[in-house]
Amino acid sequence: MLNPFLMQVSEPDMGIISPQRMSDALHLGLGALAQLTGINRTTLARAPESDKVQGGLGVIARIIGMASALSGDNPGKAILWFRHQPIPAFDLKTAEQLVEAGHADAVLKHLEMLSDGVYA
Protein backbone atom coordinates (compact mmCIF):
# COMPACT_ATOMS: atom_id res chain seq x y z
CA MET A 1 0.00 0.00 0.00
CA LEU A 2 1.24 3.51 -0.81
CA ASN A 3 2.03 5.76 2.10
CA PRO A 4 -0.19 8.85 2.39
CA PHE A 5 2.60 11.25 1.43
CA LEU A 6 3.46 9.31 -1.71
CA MET A 7 -0.21 9.36 -2.72
CA GLN A 8 -0.28 13.13 -2.12
CA VAL A 9 2.71 13.86 -4.38
CA SER A 10 2.09 11.38 -7.17
CA GLU A 11 0.49 11.76 -10.57
CA PRO A 12 -1.58 8.56 -10.49
CA ASP A 13 -2.42 8.60 -14.19
CA MET A 14 1.26 8.85 -15.11
CA GLY A 15 2.70 6.64 -12.37
CA ILE A 16 5.28 9.24 -11.31
CA ILE A 17 6.03 11.56 -8.44
CA SER A 18 5.13 15.08 -9.49
CA PRO A 19 7.83 17.70 -8.89
CA GLN A 20 5.14 20.39 -8.56
CA ARG A 21 3.11 18.38 -6.06
CA MET A 22 6.27 17.58 -4.08
CA SER A 23 7.18 21.27 -4.15
CA ASP A 24 3.72 22.23 -2.91
CA ALA A 25 3.69 19.58 -0.17
CA LEU A 26 7.09 20.64 1.17
CA HIS A 27 6.23 24.35 0.82
CA LEU A 28 9.29 24.87 -1.36
CA GLY A 29 9.60 26.55 -4.72
CA LEU A 30 10.76 24.41 -7.63
CA GLY A 31 14.15 26.11 -7.45
CA ALA A 32 14.56 25.11 -3.81
CA LEU A 33 13.37 21.58 -4.60
CA ALA A 34 15.92 21.41 -7.41
CA GLN A 35 18.66 22.46 -4.99
CA LEU A 36 17.47 19.93 -2.41
CA THR A 37 17.57 17.07 -4.92
CA GLY A 38 20.66 18.24 -6.77
CA ILE A 39 18.69 18.21 -10.02
CA ASN A 40 18.51 21.14 -12.42
CA ARG A 41 15.22 23.04 -12.17
CA THR A 42 14.71 22.78 -15.92
CA THR A 43 15.08 19.00 -15.72
CA LEU A 44 12.49 18.87 -12.92
CA ALA A 45 10.03 20.84 -15.05
CA ARG A 46 10.67 19.33 -18.48
CA ALA A 47 11.52 15.71 -17.70
CA PRO A 48 9.62 14.80 -14.53
CA GLU A 49 9.39 11.16 -15.63
CA SER A 50 13.18 10.77 -15.99
CA ASP A 51 14.98 8.27 -13.77
CA LYS A 52 17.10 11.05 -12.29
CA VAL A 53 14.10 13.13 -11.25
CA GLN A 54 12.11 10.17 -9.99
CA GLY A 55 15.10 8.89 -8.02
CA GLY A 56 15.71 12.26 -6.38
CA LEU A 57 12.06 12.77 -5.51
CA GLY A 58 11.61 9.12 -4.55
CA VAL A 59 14.20 9.21 -1.79
CA ILE A 60 12.50 12.26 -0.26
CA ALA A 61 9.13 10.52 -0.49
CA ARG A 62 10.60 7.44 1.24
CA ILE A 63 12.06 9.58 4.03
CA ILE A 64 8.81 11.48 4.59
CA GLY A 65 6.83 8.23 4.36
CA MET A 66 8.99 6.53 6.99
CA ALA A 67 8.87 9.59 9.25
CA SER A 68 5.11 9.75 8.77
CA ALA A 69 4.71 6.12 9.82
CA LEU A 70 6.74 6.87 12.96
CA SER A 71 4.49 9.84 13.75
CA GLY A 72 1.18 8.01 13.50
CA ASP A 73 0.75 8.30 9.73
CA ASN A 74 0.79 12.08 9.82
CA PRO A 75 2.56 13.50 6.74
CA GLY A 76 2.28 17.04 8.09
CA LYS A 77 4.28 16.15 11.19
CA ALA A 78 6.78 14.25 9.05
CA ILE A 79 7.30 17.27 6.80
CA LEU A 80 7.84 19.51 9.83
CA TRP A 81 10.38 17.01 11.16
CA PHE A 82 12.12 16.77 7.76
CA ARG A 83 12.44 20.51 7.33
CA HIS A 84 12.92 21.82 10.86
CA GLN A 85 13.86 19.24 13.50
CA PRO A 86 17.60 19.11 14.25
CA ILE A 87 18.87 15.54 14.60
CA PRO A 88 21.35 15.22 17.47
CA ALA A 89 23.14 12.27 15.87
CA PHE A 90 24.00 14.45 12.86
CA ASP A 91 25.42 17.55 14.55
CA LEU A 92 21.93 19.06 14.82
CA LYS A 93 21.41 19.16 11.07
CA THR A 94 17.90 18.60 9.78
CA ALA A 95 16.96 15.75 7.48
CA GLU A 96 16.46 18.34 4.74
CA GLN A 97 20.02 19.64 5.21
CA LEU A 98 21.39 16.10 5.17
CA VAL A 99 19.52 15.23 1.97
CA GLU A 100 20.74 18.41 0.30
CA ALA A 101 24.32 17.49 1.30
CA GLY A 102 23.91 14.07 -0.34
CA HIS A 103 23.34 12.05 2.83
CA ALA A 104 19.80 10.77 2.25
CA ASP A 105 21.07 7.25 2.91
CA ALA A 106 22.09 8.28 6.44
CA VAL A 107 18.62 9.73 7.08
CA LEU A 108 16.99 6.52 5.85
CA LYS A 109 19.26 4.45 8.10
CA HIS A 110 18.44 6.71 11.04
CA LEU A 111 14.71 6.24 10.45
CA GLU A 112 15.15 2.46 10.09
CA MET A 113 16.92 2.38 13.44
CA LEU A 114 14.13 4.42 15.05
CA SER A 115 11.48 2.11 13.60
CA ASP A 116 13.42 -0.86 15.02
CA GLY A 117 13.25 0.75 18.46
CA VAL A 118 16.86 1.89 18.61
CA TYR A 119 17.31 5.40 19.98
CA ALA A 120 19.58 7.10 17.48
Image (cartoon, rainbow, N blue to C red):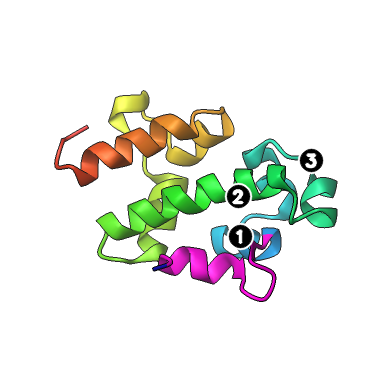
Q: Residue at x 51, y 70 (%)?
A: 7
Q: Which mark is residue 40?
A: 3
Q: Which mark is residue 22?
A: 1
Q: Give the mark nearer the N terminus: 1 vs 3.
A: 1
Q: CA distance from mark 3 to mark 2?
A: 13 Å
The image quadrant of residue 24 is: bottom right
Taking the view exactly as shown, the residue that stands out farthest to the top is 91
Residue kind at label 1, given as amino acid type:
Met
Q: Position of residue 36 (x, y in %)?
A: 62, 40
Q: Position of residue 13 (x, y in %)?
A: 67, 76
The answer to whether 14 appears left or right of 70 in the picture is right
Q: Does the CB distance between marks 2 and 1 fall below 8 Å?
A: yes
Location of mark 2 (residue): 57
Q: Is residue 41 depicted above or below 105 in this figure?
A: below
Between disc 3 and disc 2, the foreground one is 2
Q: CA distance from mark 1 to mark 3?
A: 15 Å
Q: Which of 52 and 72 lies nearest the eye of the viewer?
A: 52
Q: Which of 5 and 29 lies nearest the eye of the viewer?
A: 5
Q: Does the CB distance between marks 1 and 3 fall below 8 Å?
A: no
The image quadrant of residue 101 is: top right
Classed neighbour count for the residue bearing mark 2: other residues with Cα under 10 Å, few (<14), some (14–19), many (≥20): many
Residue kind at label 2, given as amino acid type:
Leu
Q: Is residue 16 depicted above or below 87 in this figure?
A: below
The image quadrant of residue 75 is: bottom left
Q: Give the mark nearer the N terminus: 2 vs 1.
A: 1
The answer to whether 59 appears left or right of 69 in the picture is right
Q: Position of residue 95 (x, y in %)?
A: 44, 39
The magenta stretch spans residue 6: yes
Q: Which residues are magenta?
A: 2-18
* SS under mark 3: loop
Q: Position of residue 26 (x, y in %)?
A: 55, 58
Q: Which of 78 and 65 lies nearest the eye of the viewer?
A: 65
